[in-house]
Image (tube, grey):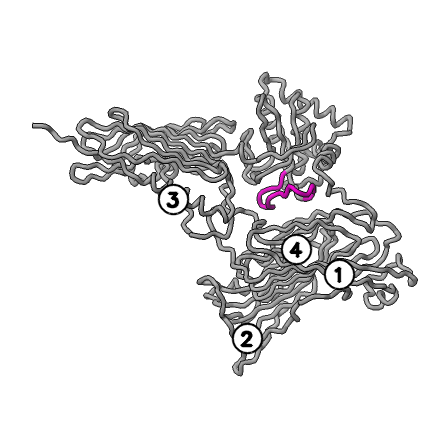
Amino acid sequence: MHDCSGLEAGILNKLTMKIAFAKRTAVFAAVLFCASLGFGQETTSPEYGKVTVEEIESIEGDWAPGTEAVVLYDYSTVSFELVSRTPRVRYTYHRKIKILDLQNRSNISRVIIPYLSPTKGETFSDLKAATYNLNAVGEVVAFKVNPRKIKETRIGKDSMEVEISFPFVKSGSVIEFSYELISKNFSQLKPWIFQGNLPVVHSEYHTYIPDGYKYLRLVQGLEGEITHYTTRFQQQSINTTDLFTRNMQYATRDFGNRFYANFSGTHDIYLMFNLPAIVAEDFTPETKDYLPGIRLELSEDFLSQSTRTLVFDNWPDLAEFVTKKSRVRNKSVREELQHISRAATIRYNWDRDKAKSIYDFVRNTYTWDGTYTTDNWNIGQALNRKSGSSSEINLLMLYLLRDAGFKAWPVLIRTRAEGNLQTIYPTMSQFNHLLVSVVLGEKEVLLDAVGETDVFGILPKIDLNELGYLVDEEGGRWVKLRDQNKIVRTTYSRFDLDNTGSVLSGDISVINENYSAVIERGRLEQFPDNPNEYLRDFVLVGMVNPQIISEDVENADNTDDQPLIVNCEVTTKDFIRTIDDLVFLKPMMIKMVSENPFTEKKRLTPVDFTYPLRDSHMLGLRIPEGYEVAQLPQPIRVLLPNNGGSFTYNVLEMGPILHLTSTILLNKTTFLPSEYEAIRTFFEYVVSKHQEDVILRKKTIQP
């Protein structure tokens, strides 16, 4: 994927490619070149090396303060080659960057280009790179990159990385590079992303798709509209003898000198202009699919006269494919699964205990190989190796649960970093992981036997995309992945104000459930010998110097779904101000929201909270004799649009005790930039109410 995401993170993002080739028939054992042989070359690509004086001298533009560089031109083409039975896709990339202010940072002159290794069917070639400056008489001078400054490194098992170090880069320089990638994967083309961490003046993407292929076109992003033009490149007759003369490396014995072929196709041009840089913002989604871009996925291959098996006419057809693919046909494997299931559940009577025993058995017995994939579903091999991919291990758990008498179903998902699912086109390639849904009573529980979270019924964070596709006996349906993985926190506080009106003492109990328990257990592990430090950092937030009298933590080591309960007794002088005979006291002493996380008036990226939230605080405050209430905060209830959430706050006086309730509820976890004003205003209300004082007054003593 060519992701314009800034030089610090590298020019390109890594793309995991799933190679799925159609069977080819002998009648189409021909050579097809589209753009690579000049067929339909209606391209506006700038000529490499043509940098003007104006491009170096000009620094005009509506750039944000501190902008280091701007992409003047970003260009890519996608064309096809069919060589015998080996189809290939050719990608060309050309980028020109203007350096505005170097700011004494060296990484602006460093570009990293990742790609897949040749063993994965991808090759890198034709790299050209140079820096352009003006000499003493105002002429453009090119400084080519020394080949010794180009380093190629293997990154992991299947990935490579090319690092380019540009020479003589300074404020005002223009750097330029171009290269080609050849890939054997034509089922899913590399997406083009128009926007990134640098401003982009001009971004242009060309695709040359032969009539022999039909692709689904998926348009993503939030920033503006993509200008789109479509033309045709004309039919061509190719004499393979002439072709071999011009491209000897492609000559094969499959072609005779008498073969001619006619070709035509569609040339699509996509353009965007003057895109602002994406800046780092709090609660920005991990994925980049909110950036404007184009993704193309093969739906039909007419050259082999077959429909791609990973693109379906409807979702029930996809569900049927998954059901057949995941079926265990080997009799000995089925018998072994039944034996394992009986052994794992024989000691338990309750359904939840049985299901949890299978979940624990799979996690403790089978090793995940670290790959997320829906390509390899060989349960027999996973049983023998005691290891497998994410889908293989979870399918093992699925069939063990079924053998134990449970209704259990596979749930196809796309992990968070890969972006959101699209629900319009039924495609398998967008999924890269598989979960298990098991029915316990009237509730469906989602399970994942791989990943960092080992709590039954709690999914790892990487799984928490918006939707998953559940395949059951009725076909399939969409399920929400985050609803069962909420942050649920309830705080009960009881405090007494002393007779001087200056000291608070009391008890606090924080009950953490669901994902809140997972998060807080992780925080507790950071303080194995000093739980008081945990209390100060994560519970008594806002107290400057509390005196902790006692503390107790329940279920600290419990990896089941039991709540984590933190209790403490504390004395503090915080949150109290005295002026004459008035006492100003902030009742939100625990988990106060003191700052709005959204301060900018406008936002370019969506807001992603990851987890639904229910944060409740209930306080009972005893007022000492000799004091009376002078003023209480007014109650409030704030609602987010479309049932996105709510905030309620109220303080009541009941005799000598004040009762406070504050509840923040976030049902919705993702808010688009168009909804940003609503979520910003929502938290303004929360901060405002949490900062309000209860005002007490000393009673007048009657003579």
Q: Which residue is the site of mark 4?
A: 115
3D distance between C-alphas at marks 4 and 3: 45 Å
Crowdedness of circle 2 by 10 Å Cα count: few (<14), some, many (20+)? few
Give the residue at mark 2.
54
Instruction: Please tell me which of labels 2 and 4 falls first in the chain.
Output: 2
Neighbor class of circle 4 (other Cα within 10 Å; few <14, some 14-19, many 20+) is many
In 3D space, how far apart are the residues under numbered discs 4 and 1 (Cα atoms)? 30 Å
Left or right: 294, with 305 as reference point: left
Residues marked 4 and 1 touching at CB (< 8 Å) = no
Q: Amino acid at mark 1?
A: Arg
At label 4, which amino acid type do we have? Tyr
- Give the residue type at disc 3: Glu
Foreground label between 2 and 4: 2
Q: CA distance from mark 1 to mark 2?
A: 35 Å
Name the element at disc 4: strand
Determine which of the numbered discs, if any, sits on residue 232 in the image: 1
Q: In the rendered image of this protein, does residue 562 appear above or below residue 690?
A: above
Q: Which residue is mark 3?
A: 684
Q: Is residue 164 above or below residue 563?
A: below
Q: Spatial distance from mark 2 to mark 4, Cα to Cα?
A: 34 Å
Which corner quadrant of the image does residue 596 belong to? Answer: top left
Tell me which segment is drawn in magenta.
413-429
* Spatial separation of the CA atoms under disc 3 and disc 1: 54 Å
Q: Which of 83/248 is in front?
A: 83
Q: Nearer the viewer, mark 4 or mark 1?
A: 1
| Residue 9: % across, % down | 55, 56
Q: Secondary structure at mark 2?
A: helix
